[in-house]
Amino acid sequence: MKWRTLIIAGLGLALALYLVWYVGLGAILAAAVAVGWGGFALLCLGSVALFGLLGSAWHVLLPASSGAGAWIFVRARLVRDSASEVLPFSQLGGIAIGARALVLQGVSAPLASASLIVDVTTEMLAQIAYLALGIAIVSARLPRTSIVTSLTRAALISLALGALAGVLFLAVQRYGQRITVRIAASVARGAGQVVAAVGASLDAIYRSPGRVAASLGLHIGGWIGNALVAWMAFRLIGSRIELASVVAIESLVAAARSVGVLVPNALGVQEAAYTVLTPLFGAGAELGLAVSLLKRARDIVLGVPVLLVWQAIEGRRALAGAAGAESDESLG
């Protein structure tokens, strides 16, 4: 791990610990424990259902002729998010591991990469719509205090920058392939062919706008589903906060996590967002931090087994490759 990553992670952890100390560890733990094992299991089941939705949003991009089943993409999405939330990587590292998981399950590398790129794009566009909904709720429900005004302004800037980034990302995918192929070919022999193959798969996906629209719709459903799970967590710890308020909170927390994309596991970023946002909607900061703690516990409970299975698959593949190489040498 690079020193820069370690430093960023350390700063994020320090911020999270400070916020826990400032708000009160006892109050946070009391709220989190109030969920009980049954409530925590319910939250985990809700998250598993969301993975089914997110995996389907990825799978729907592929033509039926690909022969890849939806379950393959659900597993790859599980690996992708588990790596982002459990391993000391940035969210970008988890995305790369998700593509690798898809290849290990038989999807060609160009198609896996292209579908991942489009899936990230549709998820980004869905998040922009989700953030716009959150801003609308904030504007409609909260009094125009200086804090709310500053928050709304920052959210609008994030919305504008996100929309611009989405448009540029789409433009590069659709119109920048020739330049990318030339650059790749000049850097390494054969790299241009790889990029061209990914570009051809991208073109094939975008020739089916209905599939892209379906992926976008499923991702919007995924973001709303994420808010439903968070609302359930708030209710289980005793808060009577309304669903619309949780949608606003979760959309802004997600935006904060996107801004802090290079922070491993969004340490400190997520906690700071909950500490600031939850009191604005009438719930204590300790409840927001309790929900954040429950989310991290859920990520560990779901993510660690997934990563262990994935590592076992990688290990078997490496051993099989080594055995094959030794067999070839003995025959030679």
Image (spheres, rainbow, N blue to C red):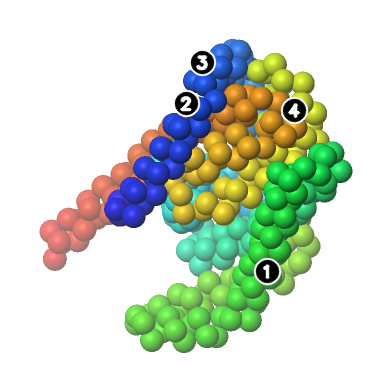
The answer to the question of whether label 2 and label 4 lie on touching residues, with beta carbons closer than 8 A, is no
The answer to the question of whether label 4 and label 3 lie on touching residues, with beta carbons closer than 8 A, is no
Q: Nearer the viewer, mark 1 or mark 4?
A: 4
The answer to the question of whether label 1 and label 4 lie on touching residues, with beta carbons closer than 8 A, is no
N-terminal of the pair, mark 1 or mark 4, is 1
Q: In 3D space, how far apart are the residues under numbered discs 1 and 4 (Cα atoms)?
A: 33 Å
Q: Position of residue 126 (x, y in %)?
A: 72, 54
Q: Is residue 306 above or below residue 190?
A: above
| Residue pointed to by mark 1 | 164
| Residue pointed to by mark 2 | 21
Q: 10 Å neighbourhood of mark 4: few (<14), some, or many (≥20)?
A: few
N-terminal of the pair, mark 3 or mark 1, is 3
Label 1 is placed on what type of residue? Leu
| Residue pointed to by mark 3 | 26
Q: Nearer the viewer, mark 3 or mark 1?
A: 3
Q: Secondary structure at mark 1?
A: helix
Label 2 is placed on what type of residue? Trp
N-terminal of the pair, mark 2 or mark 3, is 2
Q: Give the left or right position of residue 71, taking residue 155 as reference.
A: left
| Residue pointed to by mark 4 | 282
Label 3 is placed on what type of residue? Gly
Could you tell me which residue is drawn at 75 percent across and 39 percent down? 247
Could you tell me which residue is drawn at 61 percent across and 13 percent down? 34
